[in-house]
């Protein structure tokens, strides 16, 4: 069963309203535009709603009753807003036409924005993918951070070129903000609300804002256009009912504190959406843990003094003082507050740093900026002298690569590697390259003038900017950090992370790494553990690990990472692990990362991925690449923008048992071989600690045992996909062995083929049905194929899974926690 869960804090976005929303009646019309005019270099003005502001005038035109957005290139985003219209409780609708159905890539996105202000807004958008697959999503954008409010849901398949889609979206209320959206093919009956969500997060958009039309073209989809018609918006007015008298509350008395009351707690980090995950994962809320304070602990407090004794009664003021003074084996306890420090853990000291029971403690790399003065349409703060290295790769000073598909920086996000960060009232601003580009929601750092230039009015809001690059550099084995948040540091890409620990034996428990400019935490050495850890909204990666043998991730939540939109290759996403042996990732969730969710690469040997969810990531859900020996069991991999589970050049034997792989935009299960070989020294990715050639690292796929999985839906071209792009090995030679699986597809031709099956030389064989595939290969003889199957949630799939299942062997049963011999389809 899938349930919403608690992560770093109680989920603030619910895909279904917890209580009934107030009733609303339609009021005054705010926007009405039938596009019955002819314009170029813009959309002109709506008869009701005023003039449009567009972000690329040459891409906009109106004629023949439609407003056209013509994408200049793949990866382009186009927006037409109505700044003179402002509303909070509002309903809007539009007719959207995609003249050409995409043949490749992730397709065309188009929708409407509500409550847009300062670079933040709610958006409902449709997506038209290859084959005419139509889906609907609701998101919230806060500056450079996008959060899925209601996950993508399938609307229709087989949409034809020129078909019109009607979209309706409305927002009401302030806490929570109630959002509803629906879409349908023009001519069909209007459905009920298909997506409904309540947003009570700290970054919700409670006030009024403008209305706009938006579109985006996938980077792998050829250039085309999208058209809008009948764009309307109306105010909504709450229908007030007379409330019943409230009961009189029973007064309570709070117990007296046993220690002096701490100062005010730092502001909490924005909420993280974990909609769809199966279990509680990630850090406990910072400030909620209760680690015992051992006798003789060294104590630090923001109100202390570094000339004090470092005791509970006379604490130190800085964490670095405590680290320097502590003997090996000591525990350092941090009292409530924010510590604005860059720490070095001395070598030869095994130390523990933890929060005081029930007190909120952050290491914070930002400081308040208050000397703002308005200058025309922008605001400036002088005297800012923090210049950070903007090298785009792990090699300081090196330029980005030039090989297509192997560059760090996405041209659409040229400032990704610049670590400067700024927040207004907790909302992240987007950095731009010049003062002339500054608009609402953006900022520029003029290094020559030592001046920050901001496009959002800072009046009445706390403005913070990052001025420290590293939080902790660990110089000794066995370091432990518990119950502490690490946020808003500005490490450059070659700094490797806000926290770096390459000594081994480290434990990070109930720690959150959030809103850091590149990577949250980077690990090396043997025997490291991340237990109940959150990594969220970091600019490049949540967790990076290299030469990290015996690494264990247990209860890790990785969400919203690659917030700066680095390319998916060579490095970005939730978690990336390289050149390590005997790695376990369990009870964890990889959700809404803007690249891959969980990625193993470059000679990882003996890895286990069990009881994990990888959902709605903008790259692959789980990808294993040029590595060997793996077990993938009891995982849910769903609604990722690329492949679900991708196995690329994975030798040494792979066990794939009891996973639910569903509705991924690429291929749900993609098993591939390419030209890379473990015995070729010129191929990158070898582990130099091992003999060459390493007999455990052939980088030749297989043998793969694939049992008791549910593979359902999706818009890729096959349900079971096995290809050798080097045209060397057949699937049989690779040892690909699927059986006792449940396959589902929405029609007999979507995906196009049941299976793509490598024949070695030449093109692979393709089979339209399970029966044809089994007759030709002898594989999947006990599997089930359900066709004309409606789109269902993974909960429904688990509940309705019917078909043959193989009995769990003892080794797999021990991993998944079920009795050997159990027969079950999909994840539990």
Image (cartoon, rainbow, N blue to C red):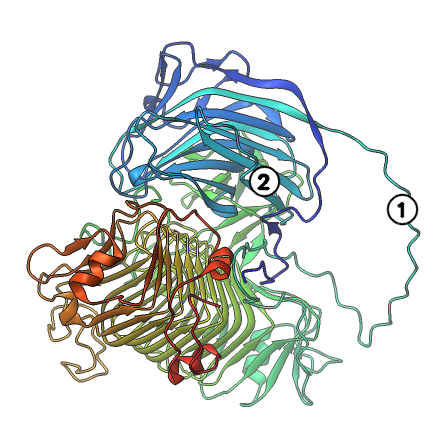
Q: CA distance from mark 2 to mark 1?
A: 46 Å
Answer above or below: position of 82 versus 257. Answer: above
In the rendered image, the quadrant that contains the N terminus is bottom right
Q: Is residue 457 left or right of residue 37?
A: right
| Image position of 668 with respect to 738: above or below | above
Residue 413 placement (x, y as % from top left): 35, 44
Q: Tell me, yes or no, if residue 376 can be seen here.
A: no
Q: Quadrant of residue 771?
A: bottom left
- In the rendered structure, which disc, 2 or 1, sits on the residue that comes first in sequence? 1
Q: Secondary structure at mark 1?
A: loop
Q: Quadrant of residue 689?
A: bottom left
Q: State if disc 1 and disc 2 touch (CB < 8 Å).
A: no
Between 415 and 606, the one lying in front of the other is 606
Indicate which label's residue lies in the foreground, 2 or 1: 1
**Residue 351 has which mark?**
none
Q: Which residue is the site of mark 2? A: 372
The x, y position of residue 224, in whole percent, is 27, 29
Residue 101 placement, left or right of 36: left
Q: Which residue is mark 1?
A: 246
Q: Is residue 717 left or right of residue 499?
A: left
Mark 1 residue crowding within 10 angstroms, few (<14) / some (14–19) / many (20+): few
Q: Is residue 151 above or below residue 215?
A: below
Residue drawn 28% across the image and 56% down it: 569
Residue 296 seen: yes
> At numbered mark 2, what does the secondary structure look like: helix, strand or loop?
strand
Q: Residues within 10 Å of mark 2 (few under 14, many from 20)?
A: some
């Amino acid at each position: 069963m899938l349930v919403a869960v608690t992560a770093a804090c109680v989920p603030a976005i619910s895909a279904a309203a917890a209580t009934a929303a107030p009733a609303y009646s339609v009021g005054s019309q705010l926007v009405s535009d039938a596009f019955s005019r002819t314009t170029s270099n813009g959309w002109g003005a709506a008869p009701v709603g005023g003039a449009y502001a567009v972000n690329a005038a040459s891409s906009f035109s109106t004629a023949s009753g439609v407003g056209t957005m013509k994408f200049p290139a793949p990866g382009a985003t186009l927006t037409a807003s109505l700044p003179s219209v402002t509303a909070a409780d509002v309903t809007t609708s539009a007719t959207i036409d995609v003249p050409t159905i995409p043949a490749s890539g992730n397709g065309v996105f188009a929708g409407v924005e509500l409550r847009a202000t300062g670079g933040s807004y709610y958006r409902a958008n449709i997506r038209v993918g290859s084959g005419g697959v139509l889906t609907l999503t609701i998101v919230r954008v806060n500056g450079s951070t996008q959060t899925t409010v209601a996950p993508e849901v399938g609307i229709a398949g087989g949409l034809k070129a020129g078909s019109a889609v009607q979209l309706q979206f409305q927002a009401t209320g302030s806490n929570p903000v109630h959002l509803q959206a629906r879409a349908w093919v023009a001519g069909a009956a209007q459905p009920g609300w298909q997506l409904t969500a309540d947003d009570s997060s700290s970054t919700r958009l409670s006030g009024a804002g403008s209305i706009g039309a938006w579109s985006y073209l996938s980077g792998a989809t050829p250039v085309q256009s999208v058209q809008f018609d009948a764009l309307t918006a109306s105010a909504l007015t709450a229908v007030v009912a007379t409330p019943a008298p409230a009961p009189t509350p029973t007064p309570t008395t709070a117990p007296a504190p046993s220690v002096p009351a701490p100062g005010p707690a730092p502001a909490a980090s924005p909420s993280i959406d974990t909609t769809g995950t199966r279990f509680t994962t990630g850090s406990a809320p910072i400030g909620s843990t209760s680690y015992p304070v051992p006798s003789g602990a060294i104590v630090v407090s923001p109100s202390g003094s570094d000339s004090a004794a470092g005791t509970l009664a006379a604490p130190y003021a800085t964490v670095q003082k405590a680290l320097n003074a502590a003997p090996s084996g000591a525990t350092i306890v941090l009292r409530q507050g924010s510590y604005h420090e860059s720490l070095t853990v001395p070598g030869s000291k095994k130390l523990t740093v933890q929060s005081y029971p029930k007190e909120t403690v952050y290491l914070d790399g930002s400081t308040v900026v208050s000397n703002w003065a308005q200058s025309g349409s922008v605001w400036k703060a002088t005297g800012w002298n923090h210049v950070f290295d903007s090298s785009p790769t792990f090699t300081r000073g090196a330029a980005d690569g030039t090989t297509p598909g192997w560059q760090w920086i996405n041209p659409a996000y040229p400032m990704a590697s610049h670590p400067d960060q700024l927040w207004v009232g907790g909302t992240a601003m987007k950095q731009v390259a010049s003062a002339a580009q500054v608009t609402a929601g953006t900022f520029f750092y003029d290094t020559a003038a030592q001046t920050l230039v901001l496009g959002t009015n800072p009046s009445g809001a706390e403005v913070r900017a990052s001025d420290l690059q590293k939080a902790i550099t660990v110089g000794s084995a066995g370091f432990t950090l518990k119950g502490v948040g690490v946020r808003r540091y500005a490490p450059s890409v070659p700094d490797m992370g806000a926290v770096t620990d390459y000594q081994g034996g480290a434990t990070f428990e109930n720690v959150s790494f959030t809103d850091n400019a590149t990577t949250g935490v980077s690990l090396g050495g043997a025997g490291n553990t991340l237990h109940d850890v959150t990594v969220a909204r970091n600019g490049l990666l949540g967790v990076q690990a290299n030469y990290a043998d015996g690494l264990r991730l247990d209860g890790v939540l990785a969400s919203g990472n690659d917030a700066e939109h680095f390319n998916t290759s060579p490095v970005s996403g939730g978690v990336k692990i390289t050149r390590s042996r005997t790695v376990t990732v369990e009870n964890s969730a990889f959700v809404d990362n803007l690249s891959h969710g969980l990625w193993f690469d470059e000679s990882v040997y003996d890895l286990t991925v069990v009881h994990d969810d990888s959902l709605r990531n903008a790259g692959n859900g789980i990808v294993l690449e040029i590595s060997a020996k793996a077990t993938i069991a009891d995982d849910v991999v769903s609604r990722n923008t690329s492949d679900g589970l991708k196995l690329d050049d994975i030798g040494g034997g792979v066990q794939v048992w009891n996973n639910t792989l569903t509705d991924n935009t690429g291929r749900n299960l993609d098993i591939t071989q390419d030209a890379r070989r473990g015995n070729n020294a010129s191929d990158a990715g070898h582990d130099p600690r091992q003999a060459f050639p390493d007999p455990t690292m052939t980088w030749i796929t297989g043998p793969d045992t694939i049992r008791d999985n549910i593979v359902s839906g999706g818009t890729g071209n096959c349900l079971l996909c096995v290809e050798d792009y080097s045209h060397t090995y057949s699937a049989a030679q690779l040892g690909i062995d699927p059986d006792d699986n449940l396959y589902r597809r929405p029609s007999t031709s979507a995906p196009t083929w049941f299976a793509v099956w490598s024949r070695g030389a030449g093109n692979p064989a393709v089979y339209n049905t399970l029966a044809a595939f089994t007759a030709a290969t002898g594989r999947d003889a006990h599997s089930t194929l359900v066709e004309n199957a409606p789109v269902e949630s993974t909960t429904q799939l688990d509940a309705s899974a019917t078909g043959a299942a193989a009995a769990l062997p003892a080794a797999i049963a021990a991993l998944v926690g079920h009795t050997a011999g159990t027969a079950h389809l999909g994840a539990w």
